[in-house]
Image: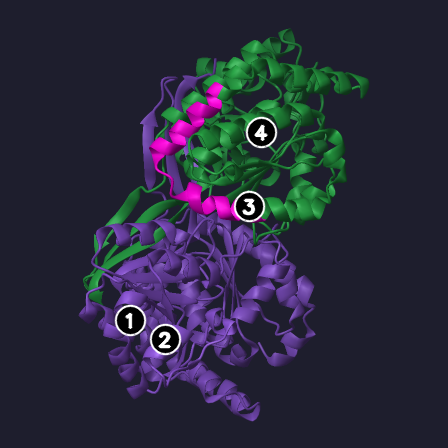
Chain colours: A purple, B green
Amino acid sequence: MTANTAVALDPSAHMDELGMRAQVAKREISSAPEATKNKAIECIARTIEQNADRIMSENVLDMAAGRQNRLTSALLDRLFLNEPRIAAIVEGCRQVARLQDPVGEMTAQQTRPSGIRVSKMRVPLGVIGIIYESRPNVTVDAAILCLKSGNAVILRGGSEAMHSNRVLAHCLRKGIRQAGLSPDCIQLVETTDRSAVGRMITMPEYIDIIIPRGGKSLVARIDQDATVPVIKHLDGLCHVYIDDEADIDKALRVAYNAKARRYGICGAMETLLVAEKIAPAVLPELCRKYREKGIELRGCERTRLIEQSVSEATDEDWVTEYLDAILSIRIVDDLAQAIDHIQTYGSHHTDAIVTENREHQRRFLQQVDSSSVMVNASTQFADGFEYGLGAEIGISTNKLHVRGPVGLEGLTTQKYVVVGDGSIRD
Amino acid sequence: MTANTAVALDPSAHMDELGMRAQVAKREISSAPEATKNKAIECIARTIEQNADRIMSENVLDMAAGRQNRLTSALLDRLFLNEPRIAAIVEGCRQVARLQDPVGEMTAQQTRPSGIRVSKMRVPLGVIGIIYESRPNVTVDAAILCLKSGNAVILRGGSEAMHSNRVLAHCLRKGIRQAGLSPDCIQLVETTDRSAVGRMITMPEYIDIIIPRGGKSLVARIDQDATVPVIKHLDGLCHVYIDDEADIDKALRVAYNAKARRYGICGAMETLLVAEKIAPAVLPELCRKYREKGIELRGCERTRLIEQSVSEATDEDWVTEYLDAILSIRIVDDLAQAIDHIQTYGSHHTDAIVTENREHQRRFLQQVDSSSVMVNASTQFADGFEYGLGAEIGISTNKLHVRGPVGLEGLTTQKYVVVGDGSIRD
């Protein structure tokens, strides 16, 4: 398929076509045995291996266009594919094949006084729409997770990666067909017209759920306009609170790692909260280490009394997800004020307390309303692999359905199964 | 409070006020111990008992206005309160107090190679908005379920029940205060202005979830306009399929009960599907019994060859939730066509198969994508009490979060709890 044919597509009609095909395909994939799904994944892995040269040559076209369009080096790096990266994509497929299939799991079984046996069966969601930026690895990664969890998927990648995505989608569909499943279990949106996204997020008759992966403004816009339910991740404005009963060594380790390990991930700490009593014992050493690493520090008044070189933080700082080498620091009276700060300014993503006091741990874990709450551990652990999910399609800051890192189980739902013996209700 | 003060309220400002109060109250109720919540429920039960006369005298005002406004006898019956009904409301409260509190439950505990311990903690959703029709018992029932599950609640009942709801809300708030909790855990919308509902369903900053309880048009309208996530129940277009390998006696019992026990509930069968081979053996007897009960029968062509007195069904019948003494009947070739009919015309609420064939049971359970799927049991079992949930705030036809009958657990979500020992990520 060439770019010209894509341009000629009517975006809305194209989306309806994809939606109808996905609805047909979902009936097949939703009840496919695990062995068939694993076979499809292996066929896909092999097809990608066999087509590595073609994938790289298509990627060269995207990279050339990207350079011409003056994409930043960070964006170009995300777009770029070479042999090791393709090998990593293939290995990722095989890892998902090894994960346990959640579909069909029966739980909560009980026999009721009426004689009926009631249980819950785990089942796929149906059709999942993924909207993401120009990262070709996501095309394969997301498709494989949807496949393993028994869902049909419609993929809408960033336009800068269209050549790479087309050849990868070709490999995905070829592999799935080799396993005897309908290729329409995996479909790529073949137009870069933005109105296709507008249609995609407003067709609940065809798509059961939308998962946007990308920057905050993309996600917020999709969430605003969608009538299909959205599993989303908005801000990751994470806090570490060093309690007055913290172990100093643990406090230094955790607070440094939470900021300095990586700046650009959603689990990175953006604001450090320190109990007043312990501040003189931890702040000077911590600030020295942050500065050594080149991190800009912005603090409240009390912080600046201890560390004069820290610049003044404004209210804006408490609500800013820097995703950068910047940290805001606030000294608080006590645990209650720390919790209040987090509940007021935080984004309910991931927040940690460092303390040896059991009662303080308990209060923090209970009262901080975030998708992950941590004790004596770095917020950078917020990740599906670190949590043992074996895979991650994203991190949800929703309260409904799934919350926190989302693996295969998050791509499923449950239904009640009732078995009787000619049972009737009185 | 009199009707006049209510009229004077600015609906939007009133809703914002309720929302802000609920946000404050939710911090308290979300971490209240089970004993405190149970104490509050008992105080509420006693306050309602002690105020039974006042409740009935306020209800008399609603009933008088209802008669004047020519409400149907069915609506008046739902509105009506007397001593036995108030006693039933009180007993309902005490039943919920005896249910296990889902909040705080820890599951999926594991220690990861990094040394962190990861688990999931069950936590309240936050603030729940309930929108319902003129049934004063729902005011208490819904409030108690939200209270026990640690949520603050905002109640918006039908205007015809406003007098009854006000005095009941007074009892609820008095009881909760007696237990030392903020009365703002339970708030009633004090205006009957419809624009208040418009504001209520579009304030995600204050309300975490909306649960509409009422007719399909009310629910559909709310779902259409809401920006707050909605746990909803739309149609209950339920099927029973009598397979060619059904036990005749079980088929007769289940298919009769599924329709005739009660017509007006969402789990009532609306369309009977019968395998061609078995139709001559079951249809004449079944139709005789339906007719005896006064049920109007509409059938496909093949049905009418067996039972000439059945009137002709149109395509409209397959998509109609009668909620009445009407049944549509279709003879299908086999299981595959039955499943296809259900997937095409059904509402994914509750569908049953009657068969002794294990493989047919398995295929039906797996391939029918409904919130409840049943074998050899009446669809009228679709109910939270029958399923052992101990309570029911509604039945969800959503795929996300909760599906099927919703009890206390459906009013909660989970968060990840990570415990380390100064743990940092490599």
Q: Is A108 one of the magenta-colored residues?
A: no
Report, in whole angstroms, how far the alpha carbon at label 2 lies from the one at label 4: 47 Å
Q: Is any atom of residue B329 visible in this view?
A: no
Q: Quadrant of the N terminus of chain A?
A: bottom right
Mark 1 neighbour class, 10 Å CA radius: few under 14, some 14 to 19, many 20 or more: many
Q: Quote the CA–CA distance across marks 3 and 1.
A: 34 Å
Report the residue marked by disc 2.
A303
* Distance from the alpha carbon under mark 2 to that under mark 1: 8 Å
* Residue to which mark 4 is pinned: B169
In depth, the one of B257 and B15 nearer the eye is B15
Do marks 2 and 1 share a subunit?
Answer: yes
Chain hosting mark 3: B
Q: Position of residue A121 (x, y in %)?
A: 38, 39
Query: Could you tell me if the residues under marks 2 and 1 are in contact, i.e. CB atoms within 8 Å?
Result: yes
Tag nearer the camera, 4 or 1: 1
Question: What amino acid does circle 4 point to?
Answer: Ala
The range drawn in magenta is: B20-46
